Image: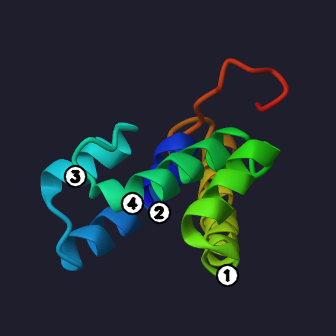
Amino acid sequence: MLAVTSVNRCRYCTYYHSRLALESGLEPAEMRALLGGGFEESPPEEAPALLYAQHWAEAEGRPDAEAVRRLTETYGPEKAEAIDLILRAIRLGNLSGNTFDYFLHLISFGRWGRYEPTGDPARN
């Protein structure tokens, strides 16, 4: 959750996923690393899934075939499919939160919400 949210930068999801991570026992150092895009604090067996999640989010849900192949090879088809399904749900939440923030920004003439241009005109 944190790997995808760090890419999509939804403040609502960052808060919610961070709270869940702390409640489930994730160390603050690992949480900060994940939110910063790093995996050095994470268990080695989770690194392939975290790298895939980050790539998946950066590719806007369209990972390259080689990444999908490596994920499936590492975790098996059933677990890889479950990871993909979870990533879709997280993306939906992130995009919803960011859209809500943009709407607040628009209706309040910039006083509420948040709008952060990506630098890529196709994604703004």
**First in sequence: mark 2 or mark 3?**
2
Closer mark to the observer between disc 3 and disc 4: 4
- Kindly check if marks 3 and 4 are in contact, taking CB atoms under 8 A apart as contact: no
Q: Amino acid at mark 1?
A: Glu
Residue shown at 62% from the left, 42% from the top: 55
Q: Position of residue 16 (x, y in %)?
A: 38, 68
Distance from disc 4 to disc 2, alpha carbons, whole Å, reads 13 Å
Quarter of the picture holding the C terminus: top right
Label of residue 46 in the image: 4
- Mark 1 surroundings: few (<14), some (14-19) or many (≥20) residues within 10 A: few
Distance from disc 2 to disc 1, alpha carbons, whole Å, reads 19 Å
Element on which disc 3 rests: helix
Residue shown at 46% from the left, 45% from the top: 6
Please tell me whether residue 35 is drawn above or below residue 109 in the rendered image: below
Q: Amino acid at mark 2?
A: Met
**First in sequence: mark 3 or mark 4?**
3
Q: Amino acid at mark 4?
A: Glu
Residue 88 visible to the viewer: yes
Q: Which residue is mark 2?
A: 1
Is 89 in front, or is 78?
78
Q: Position of residue 5 (x, y in %)?
A: 50, 52
Distance from disc 3 to disc 4, alpha carbons, whole Å, reads 12 Å
Q: Position of residue 112 (x, y in %)?
A: 51, 46
Is 101 in front, or is 72?
72
Distance from disc 2 to disc 3, alpha carbons, whole Å, reads 13 Å
